[in-house]
Amino acid sequence: MSDARLLPPNRTPLESAIAAVSALTLNTSGLRHLWSARHCLQTALPWLSWALTVEGWSDARSEDARRAVILDSIDIHRHKGTPWAIRALIRAIGFGEVTIIERVGGRTHNGTIHRDGEFPHAPLAATWATYKIVLERPITNAQAERLRKLLPAVAPARCHLVGLRYAAVANSHNGATRRDGTYNHGSA
């Protein structure tokens, strides 16, 4: 017998009679939590992320990471266009903490700054809306490309990403790793 509670309140007597003799049974236990990222069925998580327009869904690898990305997406959408949203997105997809360097440029050749490649020598009028992200851990070139595609969705529309850099090295010159192009030498 089917569950008559699934019928609408304005059901007709005929619909109630058909439901009473029907052998169709539905498991509705998972429907209650469709809009809850914590309790939603794993098979429905892609649809929940699609409905909430979640950035970084495909980059989350585990079920817990996907749930965390969905939970964080509401706050990320609320704070889009801020450095906080950039940090939250990068943290949510599992790249850890980052440092955002804004206004990359505006340095002159007057001997007051150390020339370490961090800032280009360009006038501030041309580079005021630029930023660079420094990650604490290395990422692959494929991850960097994906991150470059995700950042415009949460970064301020007027700003342009000029570089991704990481402080830790992925490979050392000790012969233990092959150079196959997966990683680079500190910036992507």
Image (cartoon, rainbow, N blue to C red):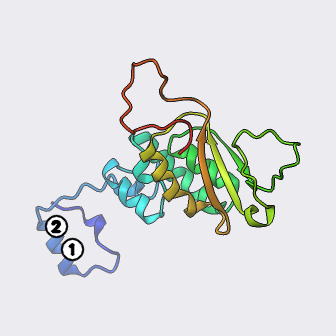
Mark 1, Cα crowd under 10 Å, few <14 / some 14-19 / many 20+, is: some
Left/right placement of residue 154 relative to residue 19 reads right
- Please, what is the three-letter code of the amino acid marked with disc 2? Ala
Q: Which image quarter: residue 111?
A: top right
- Which of the pair 69/13 is nearer the observer? 69
> Disc 2 and disc 1: Cα gap in Å?
6 Å
Question: Could you tell me residue 22's position as x and y percent?
Answer: 12, 66
Residue 16 — which label? 1
Q: Secondary structure at mark 2?
A: helix
Disc 2 and disc 1 in contact, CB within 8 angstroms: yes
Residue 26 — which label? none
Assign the N terminus to one quadrant of the image.
Answer: bottom left
Q: Is residue 115 above or below residue 15?
A: above
Q: Residue at x 76, y 40 (%)?
A: 115
Q: Secondary structure at mark 1?
A: helix
Left/right placement of residue 183 relative to residue 133 reads left
Residue 128 visible in the shown view: yes
- Which of the pair 75/153 is nearer the observer? 153
- Which of the pair 55/74 is nearer the observer? 55
Q: Residue at x 36, y 56 (%)?
A: 46
Q: Which residue is mark 2?
A: 20
- Please, what is the three-letter code of the amino acid marked with disc 1? Ser
Residue 38 visible in the shown view: no
Q: Which image quarter: residue 78?
A: bottom right
Q: Residue at x 57, y 58 (%)?
A: 74
